[in-house]
Amino acid sequence: MAAVLSRMKSVQILIVDDQTLIREGLAILLAQETEIEVVGTAGSADEAPEEIELLQPDVLLMDIQMPGMNGVAATRTILQRWPSIRVLMLTTFNDDQYLFEALRAGASGYLLKDTDTRYLTKAIHAAYRGEQVLDPGVTEKVVRRALTTPTCEEILTERLTSREKQVLVLMAEGYTNAAIAHRLSLSEGTVKNHVSHILGKFGSRDRTHAVRLAVEWGLLDQPTS
């Protein structure tokens, strides 16, 4: 039995979080697990692709709020390039917006940072097996949302912020992120985050699809405030 266990492949983890204490603490905790190996860490979502290319991890533990690209946008980008990687969001935000955006972006699960190590370990193995994992604290939100289907009007009036509506209109007019940033007097990074939120709320993989849906639903005909 020991020989069999020794030949089992460890699940290789990359931790992506801007807080050094979180990264180091998780690495120490997970190092005690015999079938999990932390192969590296990244201090931002922008650093993650280089580490993925180098280390080829099986599962990412991804924070959401980080400088530069946020974790949801990074998840979408990473899965387009490495579709076999599993991404577990590990965050302090028990927030509907981030939760559903992350799941639409392709995340394999959504965990809160106050989860215990045993549950985190099980979640990592479950994600590696291709299963979907939710923190008990957010499961009710998912069930409740599954029982309701939002209309296009609800998407506009309740789920898109006024700034996101402005960005969406400019996206439809063909403006780049840089041009939108100039028009709205925002940083390009902020515009990228708004675009990511819009794609997540529409369940879209790219801008073209999001704009097409906005046209089909008549969202661009609605006034922006």
Image: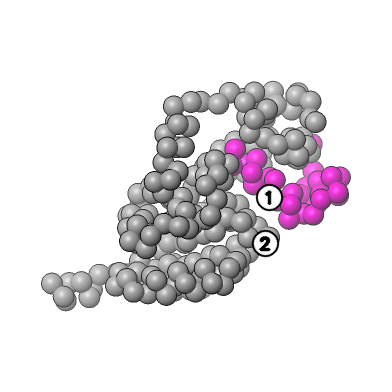
Q: Which mark is residue 67?
A: 2
Q: Residue at x 70, y 51 (%)?
A: 192
Does 109 sit above or below residue 162?
below
Q: CA distance from mark 2 to mark 1?
A: 11 Å
In depth, the one of 21 and 225 nearer the eye is 21
Q: Which mark is residue 140?
A: none
Element carrying mark 1: helix
Mark 2 and mark 1 in contact? Answer it, CB < 8 Å.
no
User: Which portion, as a residue range, is magenta?
Assistant: 172-201
Quarter holding the C terminus is top right
Looking at the image, residue 164 sits to the left or right of residue 205; the answer is right
Image depth: mark 2 or mark 1 in front: 2
Q: Amino acid at mark 1?
A: Asn
Does 201 sit above or below residue 6?
above
The mark that comes first in sequence, 2 or 1, is: 2
Q: Position of residue 70 (x, y in %)?
A: 62, 55
Does 154 sit above or below residue 107?
above
Image quadrant where residue 125 sits: bottom left
Looking at the magenta stretch, what is its main secondary structure? helix
Element carrying mark 2: loop
Packing grade of label 1 (10 A; few <14, some 14-19, many >=20) is some
Q: Amino acid at mark 2?
A: Pro
Looking at the image, residue 170 sits to the left or right of residue 215; the answer is right
Q: Position of residue 44 (x, y in %)?
A: 61, 65
Q: Which residue is mark 1?
A: 193
Looking at the image, residue 163 sits to the left or right of residue 89; the answer is right
